[in-house]
Amino acid sequence: MGKILILPGDGIGKEITGESLKIINYFKENINIDIEIEKDLFGGVSIDKNGEPLTRSVLDKAMDSDAVLLGAVGGPKWENIDHNLKPEKGLLMLRKELETFANLRPGKVFQALIDASSLKKEVVKNTDILVVRELTGGIYFGEPRYLKKINEKKVGVNTLVYDEDEIRRVAQVAFEIARKRKKKVTSLDKANVLEVMQLWRDVVSEVHETKFKDVELEHLYIDNAAMQIIKRPSTFDVILAGNLFGDIISDEIAELIGSLGMLPSASLGVNKAIYEPAGGSAPDIAGQNTANPIGSIMSLAMLFKYSLNLDNIHDLIETSISITLDDGIRTNDINKDGKAKMVVSCNQMGDEILKKIDEIKSKFI
Ligand code: NAD
């Protein structure tokens, strides 16, 4: 039914994807979900063995899979090598080859961790935002781009460019997802100053008018949005943004949630997708079995939802995480207030979540 390629990568990548793999194996063995799994090297570990972060053979396997579950790449060992051979380059190549144009980053506040947010409890309560960020266009890719001396003066240039098709396809993803959630899309732009953002606003409105009138659409200028998200986070549902604004706003929303280790992400293409936690390879805690695997396990939940259409499995995993946190079980990174009933290792957190999945599965399946 589904083919998943697991690329643990470097640092804590191996530890956290190990916990997600435990959960996949549980579903395979206990509820007969038909999933084929392959695992391979990616990032720094692939450089060590093959001389490059992403080999042709791994790319072919990714192309042949329904989804890729990734850990993280990079680390001090590979910091000083040629830029084109760096682990992070493999990540960019993979996203480009799979044409994953829509990046999804949920910002859902778990009740049990509400104190970890830098905002007041009553403001952040019930916040459940999903950012849909355009990932393969905009100012990060636009041409011309350069940094050079012109008439003895240094000049830097980047180009913010979108065509209507690029905007339309990502807007469509945002509206389709909103339809399954609280039916609201907030689109961010700077249409008052930038022509390309006027096009953004026009195309988003057109997609709304022609296909998604049952979903509420709100347009906000990015500067106003940055304020409103802090002021009234729980009133947002799906936030749609271009590459640059989406990058910034999704980190702002991450801060509402508490820890980087909690945050999943999905990058969707037409028939391909990459799922990975938002954090990096965390060299400072790698190999210690203390990393928080929840970002990876939540990424797996998204994989079940968006690539395998198993919304019930997504909900089962998310609810199990929520109950585990309610029980006061925490990894180090989410125990800054010292209020955990039990501080657990990466392995133990995976086991605890799996225990809850087993206990409550009949309500979802
Ligand atoms: P990082 O995200 O790896 O770590 C930042 C801080 O967050 C660290 O203190 C780390 O311990 C903590 N952290 C991150 N994930 C955690 C988890 N699951 N559980 C507990 N704590 C967690 O960022 P960095 O230190 O700037 O980068 C380290 C390496 O990772 C670099 O080589 C960087 O290029 C790479 N990186 C990779 C990705 C990716 O693979 N998508 C993303 C960001 C950074």
Image: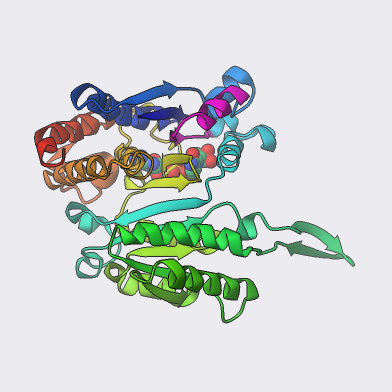
Name, please, the residue furthest toward the front. 210
Residue 319 in the image, given as x and y percentages of width and height: 18, 45
Residue 15 in the image, given as x and y percentages of width and height: 36, 28
Quarter holding the C terminus?
A: top left
Residue 110 in the image, given as x and y percentages of width and height: 22, 53
Image quadrant where residue 363 sits = top left
Please give left or right for residue 245 compared with residue 289 in the image: right
Quarter holding the N terminus?
A: top left
Question: Compared with residue 161, is residue 136 higher up or lower down, i.e. above or below?
Answer: above
Name, please, the residue furthest toward the top. 49
Name, please, the residue furthest toward the right. 151
Which residue is at the front of the view, 56 or 306? 306
Image quadrant where residue 90 sits = top right
Residue at the spot 58% in from the left edge and 41% down from the top edge: 92
Q: Where are the magenta residues, as a range? A: 56-75
Residue at the spot 55% in from the left edge and 62% down from the top edge: 167
Residue 50 among those drawn in magenta: no
